[in-house]
Image: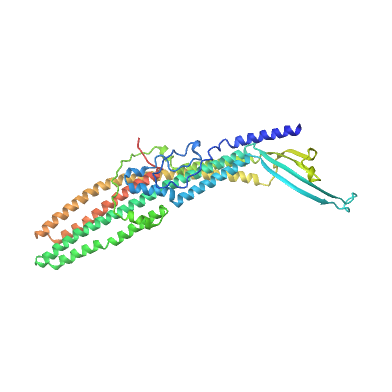
Amino acid sequence: MKIKAWGSTLLLLCLCSAATAQNGDRYLEKPLPRSWGSTAIPSSTAASADTDLFSGQILPVDDQWWKAFNDSMLDSLISVASGENYSVLAAIDRMEQARASLRMERSNFFPSISLNAGWLRQQSSGNTSELPQSIAHYYDASLNASWELDIFGSIRQRVKAQRETFRASREEYISVQISLCAQIASAYINLRELQQELQVVTHNCRTQEEVLNITEVRYNTGLVSKLDVAQAKSVYYSTKASIPQLESGISQYINSLAILLGTYPQKLRPMLEKTGKLPDYMEPVGVGIPADLLLRRPDVRQAERQVNAQAALLGASKSDWLPQVFLKGSVGYASRDLKDLTRRKSMTFEIAPTISWTLFSGTKLVNATKQARAQLDEAVHSFNETVLTAVQETDNAMNNYRNSIKQIVALREVKNQGQETLKLSLELYKQGLSPFQNVLDALRSLLTYENQLVQAEGDSLLYLVSLYQALGGGYTEK
């Protein structure tokens, strides 16, 4: 009867431990996605709710900000890269590692059970005691269990620390995704900017070639000197010489995009070598940013999770000063003859509740607590620095974007005046009322103005991408 009561008690304790450990483990069954193919990236909620702790996060809810550019090619590039980029896949692997570590830590809630079976033959010495020499042999099989009762919360604190570490790895994954989208958008904008500059240079080459033909005709008719022809050729070939450098830059950005997509440039080159336009997009941005938007940044949330993890480890180190309570037991059979092993008379059992309390270990426990407290302080300092960096990056990106819009408005007017200047100076030159130097100055200035406008438009979009990245996703002013 005592054996049955002990067995029932042990079974009840096992079930209670399993229920405790599985309380937050019900979300561990969802597999983490490895790739999402070429379809549009689905959205999901931010990583704040515990119910979403173990679900497969792809991107925060507002992180489809690039769709405001209305560029299907950019949408496709980000869609493919979100599941094929090697940095993203590595971040998923780190999250899997953290999840496995959490499960390992949670396993400490359960008892450790082992099965032992064997045969022993032993001979005692007849010269070490008054007893005669003897030989003994027997068979045995037993089931042993050892269970640490988490009375003072040491295991719970370590599980909590590992849970926060897993959440931090999840925030890191989201940060990698946001950074990836920003890198692709930036590389794509730079690519389109160079293609637009190439178009500007090509168009100006045709204009300068027409001016060169005019000077040659006027020289052949004796109206001007050969100096005008030489100057026209100098401007034309100088502009034409800039084309190879632009083509080289275009090829480099295609290579960069290929790396971000986890593929080879040959697969992207036929699609991206076709000249495309810069997105015509300008969005007004408010002066202030609500503080809760900065808290959406995954690096800020990651730093917060790391603070929570270190706080839990500090609590665990303090719990190590308290006693550890173990419940150990075994049940089995032992007999001299194998045929008698399973008989009731051969049954053995043992139950041994024990308390282990470290009263002195040098300075090990003291320094472990000091180390945990110092690590917590370091995590807090890192969190504060991350928040300040987020504010700085957001403010810089916002100011740069607003000023870039003002620059674009001014450069568009400059470009229009440059075109008018070239038209008027060329008409006066044809009539012999203006020197050719005015035409040369107008040609050079127009090329400069058009290039500056294209660069300003590209920089403005890059600042906007930086602002989205600094905010951890899309921004909608309320």
> What color scheme is it?
rainbow
Against 258, residue 169 (above or below) is above
Instruction: Please provide percent x and percent y for residue 109.
Output: 63, 39
Against 23, residue 257 (above or below) is below
Q: Is residue 253 visible?
A: no
Res 221 → quadrant: bottom left
Instruction: Please provide percent x and percent y for residue 223.
Output: 9, 65
Q: Which quadrant holds the C terminus?
A: top left
Q: Is residue 126 left or right of residue 325?
A: right
Q: How many marks?
A: 0
Q: Nearer the viewer, residue 85 or 469?
A: 85
Res 259 → quadrant: bottom left
Q: Nearer the viewer, residue 129 or 112?
A: 112
Q: Is residue 45 left or right of residue 137?
A: left
Q: Is residue 425 left or right of residue 61?
A: left
Instruction: Please provide percent x and percent y for residue 116.
Output: 72, 46
Q: Nearer the viewer, residue 14 or 408?
A: 14
Q: Is residue 284 visible?
A: yes
Instruction: Please provide percent x and percent y for residue 455.
Output: 29, 52
Q: Which quadrant holds the N terminus?
A: top right
Q: Nearer the viewer, residue 475 or 378?
A: 475
